[in-house]
Image (cartoon, grey):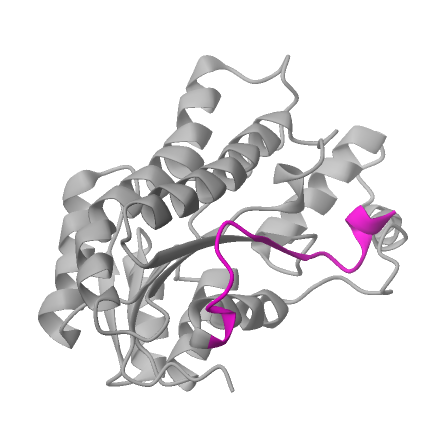
């Protein structure tokens, strides 16, 4: 199940964390993958670890030229593009009063502009491959549970991820109306044991006023009914599913993977 043989994927923010693991698991499922990130050394290492089925690409998601080059790498090296994973994102962890206009432009540039540009510029290649694919092409937008419910820790992050959530639903409907055969779904991680997950513990510790990361981690864990934090592999498995033909009847959907946090 969940095989991706013959498919080509492009993953943004693929140098580490969820993006890197998604690239590995997409390749393990049979896809050829463009490992795209602004962190060139790390993305090259991820691609090298995957082998001949992967190629690295420099990608600042705020730049149209970078997106065009990364999509060109998928088409030029592997013959097309079937799957786009808009994964790149940043977390600033400031309150609305503490955030500056520069902070606003920074987080919107990555979390919103990046998703918009990736989607808009990848559509022609995705649409072309969709013509001969049983279930069409797939866009997977990595949002967050903070895009479904409010965040007391990071309101700007929540705003951008809420935008990703509704952009996913809206483009799903737009592409269906246009008969493009491009499915669009979002995935919503909870707290994941990655660099960004560590940032949430630091924010909690700072807000508590004690700087105690271990205590902050325990407080966070107590909110997870499943009894653990997520792993990059957990979310990568969900991405592989949404990229595969097995999710062919899903578009405009939100796949929540949060250990039960938002069920409470």
The one nearer the camera, 250 or 96, is 250
User: In the rendered image, is residue 97 in sight?
Assistant: yes
Magenta span: 246-264
Location of residue 215 in the rendering, given as x and y in whole percent from the top left corner: 87, 48
**Point 61% across, 33% down: residue:** 158
Q: Is residue 12 visible?
A: no
Which residue occupies 75% across, 61% down? 229
Q: Position of residue 165 (x, y in %)?
A: 53, 41
Tell me if residue 192 comes above or below residue 169 in the rendering.
below
Residue at x-position 69% and y-position 52%: 190
Query: Is 200 left or right of 59, judged from the image as shown?
Result: right
Q: Quadrant of residue 139?
A: bottom left
Give above or below for 230 relative to 50.
above
Q: Nearer the viewer, residue 95 or 182?
A: 182
Image vertical order of residue 3 relative to residue 33, above or below: below
Q: Residue placed farthest to the left in the image?
A: 76
In the rendered structure, does residue 34 fall within the stretch colored magenta? no
Q: Residue at point 37% right, 31% down?
A: 109
Question: Depth check: 229 or 258 in front?
Answer: 258
In the picture provided, is 72 more to the left or to the right than 47? left
Q: Is residue 260 left or right of residue 35?
A: right
Q: Is residue 259 magenta?
A: yes
Counting every numbered tag in the picture gives 0
């Amino acid at each position: 199940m969940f095989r991706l043989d013959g498919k080509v994927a492009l993953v943004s923010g693929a140098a580490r964390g969820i993006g890197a693991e998604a690239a590995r698991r997409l390749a393990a499922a049979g896809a050829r993958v463009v490992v795209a990130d602004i962190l060139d050394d790390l993305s090259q290492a991820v691609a090298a670890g995957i082998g001949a089925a992967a190629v690295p690409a420099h990608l600042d998601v705020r730049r149209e030229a970078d997106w065009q080059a990364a999509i060109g790498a998928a088409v030029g090296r592997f013959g097309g593009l079937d799957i786009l994973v808009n994964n790149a994102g940043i977390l600033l962890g400031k309150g609305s009063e503490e955030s500056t206009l520069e902070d606003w432009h920074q987080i919107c540039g990555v979390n919103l502009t990046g998703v918009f540009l990736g989607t808009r510029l990848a559509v022609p290649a995705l649409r072309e491959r969709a013509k001969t694919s049983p279930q069409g092409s797939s866009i997977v937008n990595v949002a967050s549970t903070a895009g479904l419910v409010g965040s007391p820790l990071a309101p700007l992050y929540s705003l951008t991820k809420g935008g990703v959530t509704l952009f996913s639903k809206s483009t799903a409907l737009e592409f269906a109306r246009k008969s493009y055969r491009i499915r669009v779904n979002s995935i919503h991680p909870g707290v994941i044991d990655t660099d960004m997950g560590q940032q949430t513990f630091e924010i909690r510790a700072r807000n508590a006023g004690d700087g105690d990361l271990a205590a902050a981690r325990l407080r966070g864990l107590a909110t997870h009914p499943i009894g653990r934090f997520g792993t990059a592999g957990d979310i990568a498995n969900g991405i592989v599913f949404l990229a595969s033909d097995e999710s062919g009847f899903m578009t405009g959907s939100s796949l929540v993977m949060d250990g039960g946090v938002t069920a409470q």
